[in-house]
Amino acid sequence: MSTATIINGKEVSARLKKEVKEKIQALGVCPSLHVVLVGNNQASLIYVRNKTKACEECGIASTTHHLDESVTEKQVLKLISDLNADYSVDGILVQLPLPAHISQTKVINAISPLKDVDGFHPMNLGLLLSGEPRLVPCTPLGIMKLIEETGVEVQGKKAVVIGRSLIVGKPTAILLLQRNATVTVCHSKTKDLQQVVREADIVVAAIGKAGFVTGDFIKEGAIVIDVGINRGQDGKLCGDVDFESASKKASFITPVPGGVGPMTIACLMHNTLHAYLLRKQPVRGVFPSAK
């Protein structure tokens, strides 16, 4: 029975942020990221604070537009329109979730695809699907970098993604397909879920249920990437994977916290620089978006 090697997302993200900082310094530029935050959701406030700190580390100018929860959808769309038109703005990120009276779809679709550093705009998702990725969603991009960290060749492996969201599940499945993995996407309607997952060489858990994926789901020697961020009964942060039992079967596993989370923010820094280059220094191959 194996004991898994922990994939340290903090270390990998620190290297990526250092790479971004060095590229920015070499170019002698200062990309700008504008974050739109509506309301006072505590998790969102923490995320935005972490993003601001990462921008400072990398040499990216960060501006947060903190709007009251009572703001209208029309006002939010007007702000995004103004940011789209402002040449000095390189990246636009709308912190999710939004209040119920504001359409998340309308807001995301209103962001210029060239400034969409979250990679959620239909045009960017379409480019990803077509095999010509431009701005790739941050969490899936971070997941792929963590898998690369293991040194295991993805090509030919069986991969199972648990969860089919546009933010994580579907883009991750596409990226794995592009690396020539054989990919299965599981969801709430999947029959014999445990048996399907047990066949996987690579498991990406993004189902949103604390400790749902136990060691019984895991094939001996599999790579396990835990995307979940939940609160356990003891109030502590935990993932979708039961770390204790899964780590006895896996060859590599990400912890929660300290796994995928830091990579999401580091990849946002990566995307902000890439968005700058797309509009202002469109030199082919300077900073590929998905590698």
Image (tube, helix red, strand yellow):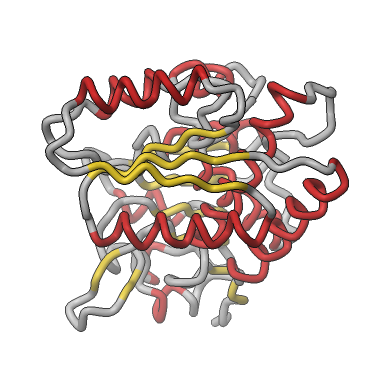
* Along the line of sight, the residue nearer the viewer: 225 or 1: 225
When the figure is inspected, residue 176 is found, relative to residue 123, above or below; the finding is below
User: Can residue 224 be seen?
Assistant: no
Where residue 32 sits, quadrant-wise, is top right
Residue 173 at x, y = what percent? 50, 36
Residue drawn at (31%, 51%), measured in percent from left and top?
A: 207
When the figure is inspected, residue 233 is found, relative to residue 39, above or below; the finding is below
Residue 142 at x, y = what percent? 58, 50
Residue 228 at x, y = what percent? 36, 59
Quarter of the image where the N terminus is located: bottom right
Residue drawn at (42%, 46%), measured in percent from left and top?
A: 64
* Along the line of sight, the residue nearer the viewer: 188 or 256: 256
Q: In this view, does 154 lie to the left or right of 213?
A: right
* Along the line of sight, the residue nearer the viewer: 85 or 2: 85
When the figure is inspected, residue 66 is found, relative to residue 289, above or below; the finding is below
Residue drawn at (47%, 62%), measured in percent from left and top?
A: 50
Residue 27 at x, y = what percent? 85, 41
When the figure is inspected, residue 167 is found, relative to residue 202, above or below; the finding is above
Residue drawn at (39%, 71%), measured in percent from left and top?
A: 215
Residue found at the very far right of the displayed protein: 26
Where residue 36 sits, quadrant-wise, is top left
User: Can residue 111 be seen?
Assistant: yes
Quarter of the image where the C terminus is located: top right
